[in-house]
Each structure stands twice: as C-alpha cells, then as structure tokens.
Image: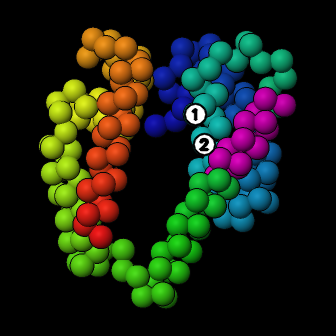
Amino acid sequence: MLASDSLPPVEKQAFDRLSRTFRPGLMAFFLRRVGNRAEAEDLTQEVFARLAGMNREQMQSAEAYIFSMAGNLLRDRQRREKVRFEYRVDALASESVGIDQLDPLRVAVGREILADLGDALSELPEATRTAFILYRLENVDKRAIAAALRMSVSSVDRHLSRAISHLIQRVREKT
C-alpha cells in the first residue's frame, strides 16, 4: 500500500506531484550515503510515509523540508547501527574472554542473590519495604510515596535509609 492511498483526491494529487518531483533526488541522496538500493528505497518510502501523515500547507519549502527529513532519517539510522555495532562488539568481547552471557552458573548465582535480597526485604517492616520497593523498583516519586503511605517525605527518606542499610548488612553477611 502506498503512502498516498489513504489521502483525499486533491491531497493525493499534490502528494503524487511531490513524489514525482523529489523521489529521484531522494533515491540518489540515500543511495550515495547507504550504498544499498533496497535500503535507499526503504528510506525514501519512509520520507513519503511521514509526508502523507502531515499538513503540507505548513511547509515553507518542500525541498528543504523533505531533505531535512531525509538527513534526520539517516542520522537515526546511523545511531541505530552504532548501537547494534557496539552490542555486537561487546558480545564478541565477552565470548573471547570466555564469559558466556547465559552461563548456567551465572544464572544460578543471580537467582540465589535475588532470593537473598527477597528474603532481606521480607525482614523489613511493611512501611519500609513498601517505600523501598516503590522508590527503587517502581521508580515512584518520594512525594507520591509519602502521600500514598500517609507520611512525610522525610519519613520516606528514613525508611529508604533503613532499607538500604539492612540490605547492605545482609549482603556483607553473605560474603
């Protein structure tokens, strides 16, 4: 399905005119930068898909807008490729050092540590445990925790300090 298929007839004509005018230039722009015809076509189609969903009357200069959008798509693509590359490098480095990401021993140790932390949390008073879980695991704001538990923000801070101290003590006992 083409990006222009869902447009009213008048807008479809304007969109098709933009496509005829700018598609060859966009293809050349992308092809020079990515070196892959299929990927250049995908990026060109992405530009026109985004254009189909916007009000083209607000554009000052169609050419400047379209090629700015194309440049932004390339930057997004480069960022994604960089993240993928770094992940592959890290994975290869881990393998070459002999670290298996899913080593059964590491998984078992991790589960044991989580169980120990769960036990340590269960030893805490309910308000302290709840405040800690909400703040550290659920990322709830201290003011929201204070309101939910009907206490002051400074009380929430004290509960969090107690919880952290208790967990640190339990970890030290295990090592």
**Quadrant for the C terminus in the image:** bottom left
Residue interval drawn in magenta: 64-77
| Number of numbered discs overlaid on the protein picture | 2
| Residue at horizontal 20 percent and vertical 50 percent from the top | 120
| Residue at numbered disc 2 | 45
Judge left or right: residue 70 versus residue 45: right
Q: Is residue 66 visible?
A: yes
Q: For residue 38, which quarter of the picture?
A: bottom right
Judge left or right: residue 156 versus residue 174: right
Amino acid type of the residue that numbered disc 1 sits on in the rendered structure: Ala
Q: Main secondary structure of the magenta part?
A: helix
The question of residue 92 being in magenta is answered with no
| Residue at horizontal 62 percent and vertical 13 percent from the top | 10
| Residue at numbered disc 1 | 49
Give x and y (percent) for residue 157: 40, 28
40 or 170, nearer to the observer: 170
| Residue at horizontal 72 percent and vertical 41 percent from the top | 72
Question: Is 23 above or below relative to 18?
Answer: below
**Crowd rating for badge 2 (residues with CA inside 10 Å; few <14, some 14–19, many 20+):** some
Judge left or right: residue 145 versus residue 65: left
120 or 107, nearer to the observer: 120
